[in-house]
Image: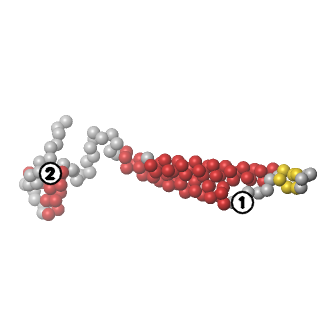
C-alpha cells in the first residue's frame, strides 16, 4: 500500500502535473490537497474503522436521547402533576377501599418511575 506524503510545493498536484490549469478554484483545491494532505474527492481513510459509522452513531444516539427525554418528561409530568384519587372512602368504623382508585394511583407512580428512567437514559445517551 503506497503511502501518500503531502508535498507543500503547492504548484504540483494532479491537475498541474497533467498540464491542466483551471483557475482560482483549482488552485485552492490543489493547495489544500498538497499542503494538508486532505483530499477533496470525498475519500475516506480506510484504516479508520470508525470513519463511516461515527456520524451515524452520534445522530442515532442524539435523536434517540431526544425522544427518550421528551417521552420521559411527559411521563414524569403526568405522574407528578395529575392529582391522585382517594383510595379509602368512609369514616373510622366503615372504610371502603376503592380498587380503581388504587390502580389509578399505582399507574401514576409507574409513570413517575418510567419518566425518571427515560430521562436518565436520555442523559446517558446524550453523554455518549
Residue visible at 15% across and 52% down in the picture: 35
Q: Does 34 sit above or below residue 46?
A: below
Residue 14, given in percent of the width and then of the height, sits at 13, 51
In-front residue for pair 86/71: 86
Residue labelled with disc 1: 83
Q: Is residue 88 left or right of residue 117?
A: right
Question: Seen in the image, is 52 located left or right of residue 77?
Answer: left
Q: Can residue 32 be seen in this view?
A: yes
Residue 4, image quadrant: top left
Q: According to the image, label 2 marks what residue?
A: 34
Return the x and y of residue 109 as percentages of the image width and height: 68, 51
Q: How far apart are marks 1 and 2 (CA)?
A: 68 Å
Give 126 or 11, whichever is nearer the viewer.
126
Could you tell me which secondary element the residue under label 1 belongs to?
loop
- Dot 1 surroundings within 10 Å: few (below 14), some, or many (20 or more)? few
Q: Residue at x 46, y 51 (%)?
A: 126
Please, which residue is most extreme toward the top here? 1
Q: Is residue 126 shown left or right of residue 74?
A: left
Residue 64 makes an appearance in the image: no
Q: Residues within 10 Å of mark 2 (few under 14, many from 20)?
A: many
Q: Nearer the viewer, residue 30 or 95?
A: 95
Mark 1 touches mark 2? (CB < 8 Å) = no
Give residue 62's mark.
Answer: none
Determine the residue located farthest toward the bottom in the rendered image: 24
Closest to the observer, 29 or 91? 91
Instruction: Please report whichever mark, 1 or 2, sits nearer to the chain's N-terminal start.
Output: 2
Residue in view at x 26 percent, y 44 percent: 45
If the image is split into quadrants, where does the N terminus sit? top left
Amino acid at each position: 500500500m503506497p503511502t501518500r506524503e503531502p508535498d507543500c510545493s503547492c504548484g504540483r498536484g494532479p491537475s498541474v502535473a497533467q498540464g491542466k490549469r483551471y483557475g482560482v478554484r483549482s488552485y485552492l483545491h490543489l493547495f489544500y490537497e498538497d499542503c494538508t494532505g486532505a483530499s477533496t474527492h470525498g475519500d475516506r481513510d480506510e484504516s479508520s474503522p470508525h470513519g463511516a459509522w461515527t456520524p451515524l452513531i452520534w445522530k442515532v444516539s442524539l435523536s434517540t436521547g431526544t425522544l427518550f427525554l421528551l417521552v420521559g418528561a411527559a411521563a414524569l409530568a403526568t405522574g407528578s402533576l395529575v392529582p391522585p384519587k382517594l383510595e379509602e372512602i368512609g369514616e373510622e368504623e366503615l372504610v371502603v377501599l376503592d380498587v380503581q382508585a388504587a390502580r389509578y394511583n399505582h399507574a401514576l407512580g409507574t409513570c413517575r418511575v418510567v419518566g425518571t428512567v427515560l430521562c436518565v437514559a436520555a442523559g446517558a445517551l446524550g453523554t455518549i
